[in-house]
């Protein structure tokens, strides 16, 4: 068989776009590779310990920030205020 049948090529595009490559193998488990500093086309083995590749996925980006401008705190304050008012009027 040709060598191309034993590897899978994956296009990572720009460096840093993805952080990890996760591959699952039938009856073997899975493998994870750090690809945060790689770009372009890479190859992963189609067979691992005699088991075939059943799926793969890319995870990224490296740093994910939480975009919170205080809306969450404001909504929490409003919800607590409504609960306090409801308790006051239901206690009568």
Image (spheres, helix red, strand yellow):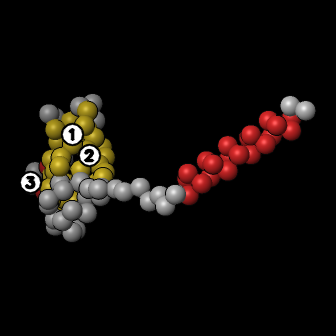
Residue 47, image quadrant: top left
Label 1 CA crowd tier, 10 Å (few <14, some 14–19, many 20+): few
In the shown orientation, is residue 53 left or right of residue 80? Answer: left
* Residue 17 percent location from the top left of the image: 25, 63
| Mark 1 and mark 2: Cα distance apart in space | 6 Å
| Mark 2 and mark 3: Cα distance apart in space | 22 Å
In the current view of this chain or complex, which residue is farthest to the right?
A: 92
Q: Which mark is residue 3?
A: 3
Q: Nearer the viewer, residue 51 or 82?
A: 82
Residue occupied by mark 1: 31
Q: Is residue 20 above or below residue 91?
A: below
Q: Which mark is residue 41?
A: none
Mark 2 residue element:
strand
| Mark 1 and mark 3: Cα distance apart in space | 21 Å
Determine whether label 1 and label 2 are within 8 Å by CB: yes
Q: Nearer the viewer, residue 18 or 45?
A: 18
* Residue 54 percent location from the top left of the image: 30, 43
State which tag comes first along the sequence, 2 or 3: 3
Label 2 CA crowd tier, 10 Å (few <14, some 14–19, many 20+): some
Q: Which mark is residue 22?
A: 2
Mark 1 residue element:
strand
């Amino acid at each position: 068989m040709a060598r191309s049948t034993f590897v899978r090529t994956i296009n990572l595009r720009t460096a840093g776009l993805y952080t990890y490559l996760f591959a699952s193998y039938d009856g073997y488990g899975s493998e994870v590779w750090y690809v945060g500093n790689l770009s372009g086309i890479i190859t992963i083995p189609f067979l691992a310990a005699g088991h075939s590749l059943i799926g793969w996925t890319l995870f990224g980006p490296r740093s994910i920030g939480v975009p919170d401008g205080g809306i969450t705190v404001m909504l929490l304050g409003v919800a607590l205020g409504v609960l306090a008012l409801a308790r006051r009027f239901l206690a009568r």
